[in-house]
Amino acid sequence: MKNSLYIFAAVAMLMSSCSASYSVQGSSSVSALDGSKLYLKALKSGEVRNIDSCDVIHGEFHFAGLLDSVRMANLFMDDESIMPVVLEEGEITVKIDNASQSVSGTPLNDSLYKFIDKHNQLSNRMSELSHRQSQMLLDGVEEQVINEQLSAEAAQIAQEEDELVTKFIVNNFDNVLGPGVFMMITSQYRYPILTPQIEDIMSKATKTFKADPYVREYYRTAQENEARMNGLDDDGQQATGQPSAPLTNVPQQ
């Protein structure tokens, strides 16, 4: 009997020692955050649910807990999404200031924020086009010339963005980053739709990616909406009606 108890205790200790945990150490120089309560939230069963919460005290905050699996979450202040965070084993560092937000310290967070930095650079280049347009008008450049030049540059930036996002998702089909970034790019739409980029991604998708609950439901609903907009129901019959409503109020990135 004693031997059985020793074996049980040893197994319990081993299971406890193998439990994965996350630790998020954050700092902020944004005065509006000081004294606020922050939340970690994630999408589960079609709903955004709280995982953890803490207070910001003198610009510092900390989350910690056990992990049943690696997951993509969002950092919120009240109902306002601030930034995405991958909850994975290790020491995660979050930095927030008025100019930028970053997460580092673990492999998936490092990878995610390298992608976000590149994406932000493309967004900044796109925003700069409007400033250049104004400056070119002041310099007396003909409007047709301006439109032709800037339209070509905008198309090039859009293509680079499309390639960046698609490549990142494809390279991360089998971890949480692929579905997580897929959620980011699709949450901008009023309802699930199929775009050339989404069709391209799904044509390359692995079984793991297709089985993700959000990806699976989004793609199914988008296909149904496409059929409705083309005037056909699921059985190929003429149909009427509006596209389905969005899947959920997913965290905005």
Image (cartoon, helix red, strand yellow):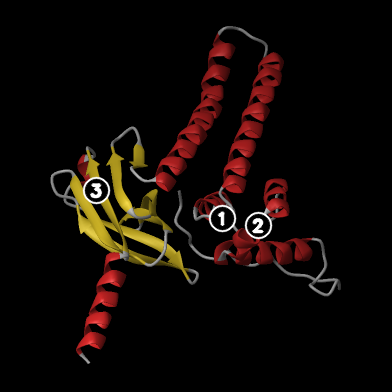
For mark 3, does the 10 Å Cα neighbourhood hold few (<14), some (14 to 19), or many (20 or more) residues?
Answer: some
Q: Nearer the viewer, residue 36 or 15?
A: 15
| Disc on the earlier residue, 2 or 3 | 3
x 62%, y 29%: residue:
157
Residue 106, placed above or below residue 233? above
Q: In this image, 82 relative to 166: left or right?
A: left
Q: CA distance from mark 2 to mark 3?
A: 34 Å
Residue 131 rendering spot, x and y as whole percentages: 51, 20
Q: Amino acid at mark 1?
A: Asp
Q: Earlier in the sequence, mark 2 or mark 1?
A: 1
Amino acid found under the numbered disc labelled 3: Gln
Residue furthest left in the image: 58
Occupied quadrant, residue 206:
bottom right
Q: Are marks 2 and 3 in contact (CB under 8 Å)?
A: no
Quadrant housing residue 237: bottom right
List the residue tagged with mark 1.
174
Instruction: For marks 2 and 1, give the CA distance.
Output: 7 Å
Q: Which residue is mark 3?
A: 25
Q: Which mark is residue 206?
A: 2
Q: Is residue 239 above or below residue 84?
A: below
Q: Is 116 placed left or right of 178 in the picture? A: left
Give x and y (percent) for residue 101: 35, 39
In the displayed structure image, the side of residue 123 where residue 223 appears, left or right: right
